[in-house]
Image (spheres, rainbow, N blue to C red):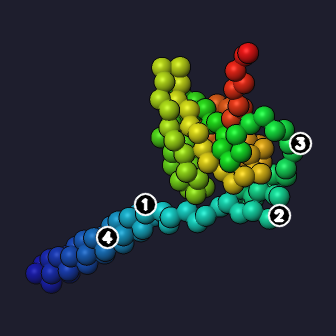
């Protein structure tokens, strides 16, 4: 019986060691998966075409009654932080305006690419709307 008990103990120790090794490798694998790699820049300009995440946005008709080099971006309720993260990912500078009616941004974009950015923002999660920053003309 002593030999049988020895075999059971050795087998139990090996089984426990094997289970511990599997658990440890599982933990390592999980922690590696939990650390995503930083996102690479996803924005580029080719002539008058804007590329965002592989989607192409061509220049539309131009008007002259807006501020060149920026657009207005309105956040969906509760999605302001998501948009801040997205704007950083796109490499864009913005100024947040918080309001009880909803948060909005003035986003700096390259001059001449305002319409392309408005089109690109239409598919970004968390965006309620995007618009040209039209100039206000005072009444006489």
Query: Mark 3 vs mark 2: which is more N-terminal?
Result: 2
Whole-percent x and y of residue 57?
81, 51
Query: Mark 1 vs mark 4: which is more N-terminal?
Result: 4
Do the numbered discs 3 and 1 sit on residues whose CB atoms are within 8 Å?
Answer: no
Whole-percent x and y of residue 62?
86, 42
Report whether 37 appears left or right of 64. left
Do the numbered discs 4 and 2 sit on residues whose CB atoms are within 8 Å?
Answer: no
Tell me, for residue 104, which label it has, or none.
Answer: none
Q: Nearer the viewer, residue 76 or 67?
A: 67
Q: Residue at x 21, y 76 (%)?
A: 13
Q: Residue at x 73, y 15 (%)?
A: 140
State the SS at label 1: helix
Tell me, for residue 47, which label it has, or none.
Answer: 2
Residue tagged 4: 24
Residue tagged 3: 61
State the SS at label 3: loop
Q: Residue at x 53, y 25 (%)?
A: 102
Q: Is residue 40 above or below residue 69?
A: below
Report whether 22 appears left or right of 139. left
Tell me, for residue 34, which label it has, or none.
Answer: 1
Query: Residue farthest to the front?
Result: 140
Q: Residue at x 69, y 26 (%)?
A: 136
Residue 95 visible in this rendered orientation of the protein: yes
Do the numbered discs 3 and 4 sit on residues whose CB atoms are within 8 Å?
Answer: no
Q: Rounded to the nearest whole Å, what is the CA distance between mark 4 and mark 2? A: 52 Å
Query: Residue farthest to the left?
Result: 2
State the SS at label 2: loop
Whole-percent x and y of residue 65?
78, 34
Q: Rounded to the nearest whole Å, what is the CA distance between mark 3 and mark 2? A: 16 Å
């Amino acid at each position: 019986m002593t030999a049988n008990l020895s075999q059971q103990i050795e087998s139990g120790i090996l089984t426990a060691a094997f289970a511990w090794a599997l658990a440890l490798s599982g933990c390592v694998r999980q922690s590696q998966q939990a650390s995503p790699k930083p996102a690479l820049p996803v924005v580029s300009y080719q002539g008058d075409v804007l590329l965002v995440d592989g989607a192409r946005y061509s220049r539309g008709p131009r008007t002259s009654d807006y501020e060149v080099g920026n657009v207005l971006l309105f956040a969906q309720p509760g999605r302001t932080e998501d948009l801040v993260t997205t704007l950083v990912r796109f490499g864009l500078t913005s100024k947040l305006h918080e309001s009880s009616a909803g948060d909005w941004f003035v986003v700096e974009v390259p001059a001449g690419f305002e319409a392309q950015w408005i089109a690109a923002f239409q598919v970004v999660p968390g965006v309620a709307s995007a618009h040209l920053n039209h100039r206000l003309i005072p009444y006489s």
